[in-house]
Image (spheres, rainbow, N blue to C red):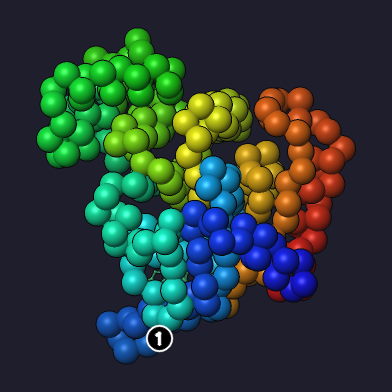
Amino acid sequence: MAELAKQTASAGTNAEILIEHIGMTYHTDGGEDVPALSDVNLSVAKGEFISLLGPSGCGKTTLLRIIADLLQPTSGKIQVAGETPHEVRMQKKYGIVFQSPVLYDWRTVRRNIRLPLEIMKLPKQEQEARVNHMLELVGLTEFGDHYPFELSGGMQQRVGIARALAINPEILLMDEPFSALDEFTKEKLHEDLLRIWRKTNKTIVFVTHNIAESVFLSDRVCVLSPHPGRLSAIVDITLPRPRTAEVRSLPEFSQLVAKIRASFEGV
Ligand code: ADP
Ligand code: MG
């Protein structure tokens, strides 16, 4: 707990996301109360890559949805760059990537990425320029005129990332975006995501139940324990950057994975 207190304080007053005493209890239609989160405190620095890690049901999605203003917490306070999540959402400063990219089958890749820009009513030329830039960023320039069903799962998720980044958000929220992909595709996407992160300077909150994935990607890993979900540890990932495939074979990588796995024991 001492480590947690220190870490929570570490991002200090210039925190991009400040989560204080957040609690969430779902009230079901059957009249049952389901406690999903209890007293979560976390401070995320601007430009940081942070993971929320834990087993299914520990409240990761709930916390991400609270940050995104898709869900109101039952207690506690959250500020994003000094504003409420609602204000931040209204200003389109969030980009969200879900496990399934939810693409429109009848729209080409290009037109899927363009959709949020059409909704924002940006000038046509600006829309085109941004879409081209996004296609390049995610490595899909040659697939702009293809339809989603013509793409592999990994490529579809790249479209999801491009669409989320097209509005140029400050914060990218990702909920298990790669968990349905095979290991090879996943590892390639990890490296590409880190390259995109470096290039765009976004703050990323990444939800996963995969320990190695969280270690490879993050600056810090927030370990959540279930019943009810709470932050049980925050682990600094001191691996060098840029992180390439070789990082996975470093002894320090395995040590961090082991350390995090151990933090789940006894919870
Ligand atoms: P995770 O993303 O870590 O798997 P969730 O945030 O989805 O966890 O869920 C946390 C807990 O809250 C679980 O016990 C889940 O069953 C419960 N829960 C999630 N959404 C709802 C809901 N809409 N109504 C009732 N309970 C819910
Ligand atoms: Mg979830």
- Where residue 220 sits: x, y (%)? 66, 51
Between 235 and 200, the residue placed more toward the observer is: 200
- Where residue 174 sits: x, y (%)? 45, 46
* Quadrant occupied by the N terminus: bottom right
Residue 73 in sight from this viewpoint = yes
- Where residue 120 sits: x, y (%)? 16, 39
Residue linked to disc 1 = 33
Judge the density around disc 1: few (<14), some (14-19), many (≥20) Cα neighbours within 10 Å: few
For residue 144, what is the image quadrant?
Answer: top left
Is 135 rendered above or below residue 63? above
Between 54 and 216, the residue placed more toward the observer is: 216
Q: Residue furthest bottom?
A: 31
Residue drawn at x 42%, y 61% as measured from the top left: 82
For residue 111, what is the image quadrant?
Answer: top left
Q: Is mark 1 within 8 Å of ligand 1?
A: no
Left or right for 7, reference 158? right
